[in-house]
Amino acid sequence: MTNELRGTVTAGVLAGIRIADFSRVLAGPYATMMLADFGADVVKIEPPTGDDTRHWTPPVDASGQATYFGSVNRNKRSVALDLTDAAGLAEARRLAASADVVIENFRPGVMARFGLAYDDVRALNPAAVYCSITGFGAGRGAALAGYDLLVQAVGGLMSITGEPDGDPAKAGVALVDVLTGQNALAGILLALRERDRTGRGQLVEVDLLGSLLSALTNQAASTLATGAPPRRLGNAHPSIAPYAVFHAADRELVIAVGNDKQFRALAGVLGEPALADDPRFAANAARVAHRHELTEIIERVLAAASAAHWIGLLEPAGVPAGLVNDIGEAIAFAESLGLEPVAETRRPVADPADAAAASRTIANPIRLSDTPATYLTPPPVLDEHRGADWLPTPPAE
């Protein structure tokens, strides 16, 4: 991305918002990519060795770049600065002092050592929104390392994930980092909205543990109300049945019955209409109490045919059901529904057919009717935009 990039590009809803992005790995870069997709000018300030995820290989994309890094860094420019060097630190301070948003996810105290903490930036630019992402806050948890797996463990998520008689399990992706990135995105936008009203910036603080506890929703509410923490149920739901993974003749499928009407429809599709009037299963609370008996009956019937066969019957009957897809199948499924889940960007090269020039990532999930996300540039090469200044601010309409 050149400094003169957006002259011919339709401005996004965040065009003119300048973001000095000191964050790395996942939570912060996820948030800033979401903002960049809607027109914010994000300068990614990296150490000379680059964001850690540049080195998290395999896998790599067609250009040889780590797919982990590529997943959260499109639409940005990269500037490598050594903050222990006077010139590098001066440039970092200049970018921070002239930005609308500064975001960082170092351990508490690191930015202060470089004169880049919130109070330092605010003294130079009172209108700056400063987002700080930590693992466990800036107080007594400041010294704790904020790794997603660790937070899933101490934050309770692993205690409710996995089979009842098995080991605690983590989610298959760094889910807490992503949730925290979404909260950072929301916090930044809230602070920018308040700045529109007052002209003043403020400090936005989000942490991984708080983000996870908030995301535990009904499970946390149950614990607070009863004093009894929930336990692992595998793929079953603590309050609804049948709402789980079931085995058909060839593969697994999910049946997610949310009410008695749907259960009666399920019983009809299975050729077992009497189940809907059986006292063990007629109401949801009874089905939850007798979930093991119900599961045995359902799986005995499902074993007679393929998962696709059953879904072909369940969906028209109004019973929520679907295959347990792998990620490739999930992307294809979204494409079949017209959701356009994949965003493609290309790096300018001499040969337009060069496969290494293309970058494919998952599209921004936020859809705006008038000012949609745009995908302009692939994830940057380290220090690709050395010496970059902010892009010109679009003229006011």
Image (cartoon, rainbow, N blue to C red):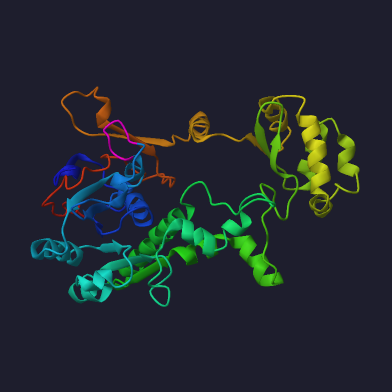
**Residue shown at 41% from the left, 60% from the top:** 186
**Residue shown at 22% from the left, 24% from the top:** 352
Q: Which residues are magenta?
A: 60-66
The x and y percentages for residue 96 are 20, 64
Asked whether the viewer can see residue 397, the reply is: no
The x and y percentages for residue 57 are 34, 41
Q: Is residue 64 left or right of residue 59?
A: left
In the picture, the quarter occupied by the N terminus is top left
Which is the main secondary structure of the residues drawn in magenta?
Answer: loop
Which of 363/224 is in front? 224
The x and y percentages for residue 155 are 53, 64
The image shows residue 198, relative to residue 359, as above or below, that is: below
Which of 61/11 is in front? 61
**Which image quadrant is residue 348 in?**
top left
The x and y percentages for residue 174 are 46, 51
Which of 250/363 is in front? 250
Q: Exactly how many numbered labels are in the figure?
A: 0
Asked whether the viewer can see residue 387, the reply is: yes
Q: Is residue 95 magenta?
A: no
Q: Is residue 256 left or right of residue 273?
A: left
**Which image quadrant is residue 118 in?**
bottom left
